């Protein structure tokens, strides 16, 4: 039986990052991952790399270019006649991006002396891991420490059973071989909005059915209101308070039944995407006699350092509590690796940023005004619109704003919320500021280059004290 200091189960952004850091720290490390690509070869990177973050962003980028041909470039004096769309080429590019990243992860593991097993890993008593290797017999390895990074899978709903053809989950929605004339989406969350944006830009009539009455309830209310207006103007038909009661695939498409305040309604679409969220993937992961504590949602219970109820066993990412975000999983993986190596580790979930890659983008970190009010924390806010930025006018990206919330007494930044172009990049400055417990005055006194979109952050910080210059 082979022995390792650490065995990682799962090769997604939580697992492979943890394995690399363990390797850097001199720990004998193995990683077990069962994902296979369309070519039947190991495809490291988990959901994020294979059917999530990376391929969706590739298609978002491609579709945005196509959309700009008709809607943005003419204003720049650029007209292209006869532009056409080749979905097959677009998908091939997306697949190439994924395969390139797959190879990159494999190379990084090899560089850091991590042994990679392609197969299903299962935790057994005594911190043994049984590995059902693809194409070979099961083998068992021993580990001083085990890190479970098994990720998550889409939530299925009985009223709309996924068949992989007409009714699909996010994986299927990344591989349509043609643009659906009419596309239905169940769920107006991150996945639904991003996938809806892709196919809407390419010409689909997109209808999104959201059971909740509020749009993006986790986001700042002002941002949610402005985003709903913007997405509706782009052509996304978003129906709130619409609970799907049934969906049936037929020869000509999918018949969807739903209920809202007006009563029962019907919708006919060519394809239907089920995007109602994800759940922790822990199926067949642990032998029954191990005694690993789980919560009611099927997640592995952990403490603040990601330690489970079993000595030497840790869990990170989507398999545990907290937001299902790739970067959150990676940071947890690094913290666990350093804990195992004997270092002090700290995970500040308060400063984990959220991003929705629509256009305009949505990004935030920290609390919203509503959350601060619920906590009884008095705050001051400052906002600044993109339309007052010279760079925004130059690039034609004037829709959006930056909002900063600071403690009313100490002026410490408690939340930053951005709706606008490049929000996913701009939020990093806010995260850094919050990590160092900066005040809005600190950001206000930080020189920002002109002309840039980042000036909106600077001006919003000034606005907290009522002294924005360009507003």
Image (cartoon, rainbow, N blue to C red):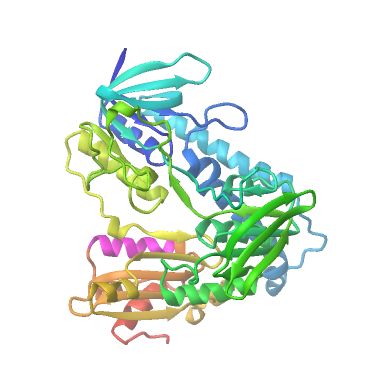
For residue 298, which quarter of the picture?
top left
Location of the N terminus (image quadrant): top left
Frontmost residue, 122 versus 46: 122
Instruction: Name the residue at 23% across, 79% down.
Output: 378
| Figure check: 174 above or below 417 | above
Indicate the position of residue 251 as horizontal and vertical percent values: 79, 48
- Region of the chain picked out in magenta, as a range: 425-436
Q: Is residue 301 left or right of residue 397?
A: left
Q: Is residue 431 magenta?
A: yes
Q: Is residue 108 magenta?
A: no
Judge whether 312 appears above or below 360 on screen: above
| 227 lies left or right of 443 | right
For residue 61, above or below residue 316: below
Query: Looking at the picture, how far across and down is residue 198, in whole percent?
Result: 63, 57
Specify whether residue 140 is in view: yes
Q: Is residue 123 left or right of residue 132?
A: left
Query: How many dots with numbers?
Result: 0
> What residue is rendered at 39% in x and 31% in y?
285
* Residue for point 66% across, 61% down: 257
Could you tell me what secondary structure mostly forms the magenta stretch?
helix
Q: Quadrant of the C terminus?
A: bottom left
Residue at image point 62% right, 40% down: 95
Quarter assignment of residue 314:
top left
Q: Position of residue 149 (x, y in %)?
A: 37, 37
The x, y position of residue 467, in whole percent, is 32, 87
Residue 400 seen by the camera: no
Query: In the image as oriented, which residue stretches furthest toward the right?
Result: 82
Q: Quick one: 395 or 368, which is closer to the camera?
A: 368
């Amino acid at each position: 039986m082979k022995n390792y200091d650490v065995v990682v189960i799962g090769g997604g952004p939580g697992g492979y990052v943890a394995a690399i850091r363990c390797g850097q720290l001199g720990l004998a490390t193995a990683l077990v991952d069962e994902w296979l690509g369309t070519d039947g070869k190991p495809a490291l990177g988990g959901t994020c790399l294979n059917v999530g973050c990376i391929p969706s962003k590739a298609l978002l980028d491609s579709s945005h270019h196509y959309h700009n041909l008709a809607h943005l470039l003419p204003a720049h004096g650029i007209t292209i006649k006869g532009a056409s769309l080749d979905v097959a080429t677009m998908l091939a590019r997306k697949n190439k991006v994924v395969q390139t990243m797959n190879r990159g992860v494999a190379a990084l593991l090899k560089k850091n002396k991590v042994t990679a097993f392609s197969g299903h890993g299962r935790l057994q008593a005594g911190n043994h891991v049984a590995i059902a290797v693809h194409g070979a017999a099961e083998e068992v390895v021993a580990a001083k420490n085990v890190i479970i990074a098994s990720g998550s899978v889409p939530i299925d709903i009985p009223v709309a059973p996924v068949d992989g053809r007409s009714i699909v989950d996010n994986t299927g929605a990344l591989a349509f071989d043609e643009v659906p004339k009419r596309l239905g989406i169940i769920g107006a969350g991150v996945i639904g909005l991003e996938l809806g944006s892709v196919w809407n830009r390419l010409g689909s009539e997109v209808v999104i059915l959201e059971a909740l009455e509020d749009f993006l309830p986790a986001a700042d209310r002002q941002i949610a209101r402005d985003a709903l207006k913007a997405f509706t103007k782009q052509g996304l038909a978003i129906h709130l308070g619409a609970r799907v009661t049934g969906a049936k695939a037929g020869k000509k498409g999918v018949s969807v039944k739903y209920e809202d305040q007006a009563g029962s309604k019907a919708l006919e679409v060519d394809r239907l995407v089920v995007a109602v969220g994800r759940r922790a993937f822990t199926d067949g992961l642990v032998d029954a006699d191990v005694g690993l504590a789980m919560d009611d949602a099927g997640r592995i219970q952990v403490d603040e350092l990601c330690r489970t109820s079993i000595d030497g066993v840790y869990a990170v990412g989507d398999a545990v509590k907290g937001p299902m975000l790739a970067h959150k999983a990676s940071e947890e993986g690094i913290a666990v690796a350093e804990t195992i190596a004997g270092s002090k580790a700290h995970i500040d979930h308060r400063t984990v940023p959220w991003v929705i890659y629509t256009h305009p983008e949505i990004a935030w970190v920290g609390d919203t005004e509503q959350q601060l009010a619920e906590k009884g924390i008095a705050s001051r806010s400052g906002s600044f619109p993109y339309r007052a930025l010279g760079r925004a006018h130059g690039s034609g990206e004037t829709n959006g704003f930056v909002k900063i919330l600071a403690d009313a007494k100490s002026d410490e930044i408690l939340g930053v919320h951005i709706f606008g172009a490049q929000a996913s990049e701009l939020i990093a400055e806010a995260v850094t500021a919050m990590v160092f417990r900066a005040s809005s005055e600190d950001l206000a006194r930080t020189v920002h280059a002109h002309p840039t979109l980042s000036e909106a952050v600077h001006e919003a910080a000034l606005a907290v004290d009522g002294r924005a210059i360009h507003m």
